Image (cartoon, helix red, strand yellow):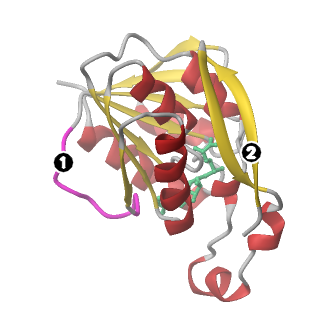
Amino acid sequence: MTLFSETRRVAGVELTLLRPESPEALIDEQAFANDEFLPYWAELWPAATALAEALPDVGGLRVVELGCGLGVPSLVAAARGADVTATDWAEDAIGLLRANAARNGLALVAEVRDWRLPWPDRFDLALAADVLYEQRNVEPVLNRLRELAPQALVGLAGRPYESEFVRAAGHVEQVAERVVLLRRAS
Ligand SMILES: C[S@@+](CC[C@H](N)C(=O)[O-])C[C@H]1O[C@@H](n2cnc3c(N)ncnc32)[C@H](O)[C@@H]1O
């Protein structure tokens, strides 16, 4: 995988990120045939920067990100003093995020997790950006967000299945142009 380095200021945090030069070159026909896996993790999607910009004061909170890809919201949350666990099903995304956290002097946990499977850890806040691009993602993402934390911030990208997610969630608050807050009913 050929990487290039890019420096960006996101939500007041300067991040130097290694990123794949050609995400299309990472397409693996066998992985697609097995589980419709596509290397979407390798792009920095606008919903991720919108979500990072919309983060509240997360200092001292336990924060989890689902489908983190390059993990910009997680990196910004770590820079602001959160105890962050970033997750994705793509092993390459997790390896690169660990490297990018180290390059930026940030501490976070990065783990391979498939959002279709529950896991026992619990957090104060869950994050997810641009994960509602396929119908099959809607139900497991909503279930994991609700289980993992009492509130979740979701970065939206104008994908067709986002309205289905909002309907299934019952009630969400718009907290920024591309970001909604979902609270678990108590
Ligand atoms: C469109 S990308 C968004 C990446 C990142 N959140 C961003 O906004 O830049 C969707 C992400 O969801 C991840 N993903 C897709 N299916 C997944 C699953 N079942 N479990 C965990 N992550 C998944 C992909 O690997 C990818 O990183």
How many tags in the picture?
2
Majority secondary structure of magenta residues = loop
Find residue 14 and name its label: none
Instruction: Please name the amino acid that badge 1 sits on.
Output: Asp
Q: Which residues are magenta?
A: 114-122
> From mark 2 to mark 1, how far is it between C-alphas?
33 Å
Element on which disc 1 rests: loop
Instruction: Give the image quadrant in which the ligand numbered 1 is located.
Output: bottom right
Q: Position of residue 3 (x, y in %)?
A: 74, 58
Q: Nearer the viewer, residue 97 or 174?
A: 97
Give the x, y percent position of residue 37. 62, 72
Q: Nearer the viewer, residue 25 or 186?
A: 25
As helix, strand or loop, the secondary structure at mark 2 comes to strand
Q: Quadrant of the image for the C terminus?
A: top left
The numbered disc on residue 121 is: 1
Lateral position of residue 24 relative to residue 47, left or right: right
Q: Is residue 13 left or right of residue 3?
A: left
Q: Which residue is located at x 40 percent, y 58 percent?
A: 115
Q: Residues within 10 Å of mark 1 (few under 14, many from 20)?
A: few
Count neighbours of disc 2 (C-alpha within 10 A) and say few if under 14, some if 14 to 19, many if 20 or more: few
- Marking on residue 5: 2
Horizontal and vertical percent position of residue 171: 42, 23
As shown in the figure, which amino acid type bears the numbered disc 2? Ser
| Residue 27 belongs to the span the image colors magenta | no
Q: Is residue 83 above or below residue 102?
A: above
Q: Residue at x 42, y 34 (%)?
A: 106
Q: Position of residue 169 (x, y in %)?
A: 42, 34
Say if the magenta span includes residue 120. yes
Q: Is residue 14 above or below residue 99?
A: above
